[in-house]
Image (cartoon, rainbow, N blue to C red):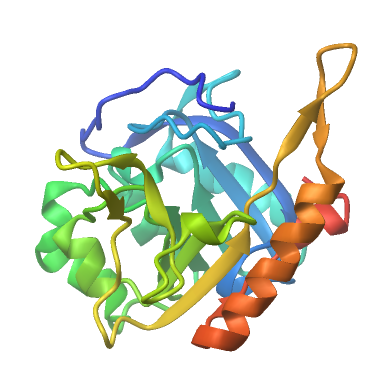
Amino acid sequence: MFGKNQIIKARYGDGETLRVVKIFGTIQGEGPFTGQPAIFVRLAGCNLRCWFCDTDFETNAKEMSTADIVHEINAARREVKTRLVVITGGEPLAQQLIPLCYALLIAGLDIQIETAGSVCPPDWSTVSLESITGRPEWSRGSLTIVCSPKTPKVDPTIARICKDWKYLVSSSPDDVDPADGLPFTNTQDKDGRRANLFRPPPDGGTIWIQPLERYLPTVDGDLVPDEEETKATLAFVSSLSRQYGYRISLQTHKILDVE
C-alpha cells in the first residue's frame, strides 16, 4: 500500500459481521510463531497510514458473518494442518473481534492478533477480554497479542496484556534512540525533537526487531526490493540484537516465497 490506503475510523458493532479481505493458509513468517503453519484472516481497513506498509488490506473487502469466517478457516485447515489462526489487517482491532475469538477458542484453536495497538474495542478492558486472555475453563485454545507500535501511545488495555512487541528497524543508526536501540517515529514533536514510538513497560515481555524492507522503482514503474539497503539493514538489526538483547524477526514467509 505504501501509505496510499484510505484511513478509516474504528467501527465497533456487535462483531457478528466483519469486513474481510482474505482468508488463506500459509506459514507465519514473523514474531513469536515464526515458522508455524497458520490460517490468516486479513481484515479490511486501517486507522493509520504508514508510508512503508506493503500490505493490500482494502482490495476485494467484503462483509462476512462470524459463522462464515469460521467455516472458511476450517476449510483452509483441511489444506494446512494447524491450530494457529492469525488475525491481521490493516488494523484488526478497529473492528470488534470478541465473537470471532470466542468461536475459535471454543473450537480449540490458538489465536494471534497482529496490531499496532493504537485502537482497541472499549469493552476489551472489561471481563470479556480478561476471560479470553486468561484461558477460562471453556477455552481449549489460547490468545496472543503481538503489538507493533507505530505511534508514541498505545491503548492502555493493549499495553497491559501484550507480551510480544515488534519494532521495524531501518539501516540508519539515526532512526533509533541510542538509549534503547528502538525506533523513533517519523514525526517530530512541537519543539523539534524526535518522538519515540511507544515502549513496553519494563516487565512487558519480549521485544522483537524486524528489518524494514526498502524498495526501488523499475523502469516499468514496479517496485523491487533494494538488495543493498536490505543487506545493510540486516547487519544493523544484527548489531542491535547483540547490543540490547532483542530477538530478531525476519519475514520468513518472503524467504519461503509464500503469501
Instruction: Residue at 89%, 11% (x, y): give it.
Output: 220
Of the 4 image quadrants, the one containing the N terminus is: top right
Give the x, y percent position of residue 196: 30, 57
Vertical arrangement, residue 8 with respect to residue 188, above or below: above
Give the x, y percent position of residue 180: 39, 76
Instruction: Residue at 77%, 53% (x, y): give it.
Output: 230
Residue 106 visible in the displayed image: no
| Figure disc tally | 0
Q: Is residue 253 left or right of residue 163?
A: right
Q: Is residue 59 left or right of residue 190?
A: right
Vertical arrangement, residue 19 with respect to residue 255, above or below: above
In the depicted view, which residue is nearer to us: 18 or 249?
A: 249
Vertical arrangement, residue 196 with respect to residue 240, above or below: above
Vertical arrangement, residue 20 with respect to residue 59, above or below: below
Give the x, y percent position of residue 73: 61, 49
Instruction: Residue at 49%, 56% (x, y): give it.
Output: 174
